[in-house]
Amino acid sequence: MGRRLVLGMLGLGVAGVASARYVQGGLESFLGAAADKDPTGLTNLLPNGGGFRYYSVASSVPDKSAADYRLTVDGLVTRPATYTLDALRALPQTRLVRDVQCVTGWRVPGTPFAGVQLSRLLDAAGVRPGAGAVRFTCFDGAYSESLTLEQARRDDVLIALSMQDKPVSHAHGGPVRLYVAPMYFYKSAKWLSGITVTHTVERGFWEERGYDTDAWVGRSNGREDTPTT
Ligand SMILES: Nc1nc2c(c(=O)[nH]1)N[C@H]1C(S)=C(S)[C@@H](COP(=O)(O)O)O[C@H]1N2
Ligand SMILES: [Mo]
C-alpha cells in the first residue's frame, strides 16, 4: 500500500478518534477485539480496551503466529542473531509496572510489561566499537524508532512478550513489541521485527513529524495538547 494512502487513512483515523474518545466500557473492549481482526485498518486509533487506544500508522498489519515470528539483531555487532519467540521466552524475563503515557494525554496507570532486557540481546550480539545507537524496525512495514546506545542499555527498556500479564496481543503490537518505560509510548514500537546497531540515532516515524527523539515523559515536547500521536 502506498505511503499517501496510508497517511490518508491515518488522517481519517485522527478525525474519527475525536468522536470515539468518549466511548466507554463494553464498546471499548469490543473495538479492541475488532481491531485485532480488522483487515481494513479503519479501526486505527480507536479505543483498545482497558484505557488504551489502538494505534497503527499502517492500514493493516500481518498477523505473526508464535511459529512465524522472528526478531533479527544486526548492524554494528560481532554476532548477528535471529531469535524465535521460543528463544526469547527461554531468556530471563524482567517485569516492570509503570504508567503508560501517550503524548496525546491518555494514560494507563500501573501497567505491567514483561520480557527480555534489550541490554541482554545487545550483549549477546557484541556491540562493536564506534556504535552509538539502536534502530528498531517493525513488520507493519511502516514504523521505526531509535534509541541512543546508552538509553537502549537501561534496565527499564524491554523486548516485551507480555503486557498486562498476558501475551502481547496483535492489537498491542504482538507477539513482540518494544517497551521503553521512561519515555512516551510512541517510543514503544509495536510488531518489532528488527534491532540494528548503528553509528548515530536516526529519527523514527513520529520524530520525522516533529516529536522529540529523546521522549522522556515530562521532559520533552510530548504534551497533552499535541495532536496526532
Ligand atoms: N509499529 C507501530 N508501533 C507503535 C505505533 C504505531 O503506529 N505503529 N504507535 C505508537 C504510539 S503513538 C502509541 S501511543 C503506542 C500505542 O500502543 P497501543 O496500541 O498498544 O495502545 O504504540 C506506539 N508504537
Ligand atoms: Mo502515542
Image (cartoon, helix red, strand yellow):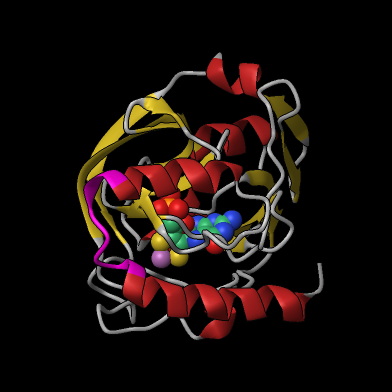
The correct choice, above or below, for 179 with respect to 219 in the image is above
Residue drawn at point x = 76 percent, y = 27 percent = 68
The correct choice, above or below, for 196 with respect to 23 in the image is above
Between 223 and 104, which is closer to the camera in this rendering?
A: 104
Which quarter of the picture shows residue 182? bottom left
Give residue 192's position: percent from left, percent from top: 62, 45
Give residue 103's position: percent from left, percent from top: 33, 71
Residue furthest right as drawn:
2
Give residue 164's position: percent from left, percent from top: 32, 33
Residue drawn at point x = 42 percent, y = 71 percent = 214
23 is within the stretch colored magenta: yes
Q: Horizontally, is 168 left or right of 126 in the view? A: left
Residue drawn at point x = 74 percent, y = 58 percent = 141
Quadrant for the C terminus in the image = bottom left
Residue furthest left as drawn:
109
Which quarter of the picture shows residue 123? top right
Can the viewer see residue 51? yes
Can the viewer see residue 148? no
The magenta region covers 20-26
Residue drawn at point x = 67 percent, y = 37 percent = 126
Between 22 and 195, which is closer to the camera in this rendering?
A: 22
19 is within the stretch colored magenta: no
Q: Could you tell me how many numbered marks the image carries?
A: 0
Quadrant for the N terminus in the image = bottom right
Q: Horizontally, is 102 left or right of 12 in the view? A: left
Between 199 and 167, which is closer to the camera in this rendering?
A: 167
Give residue 138's position: percent from left, percent from top: 67, 52
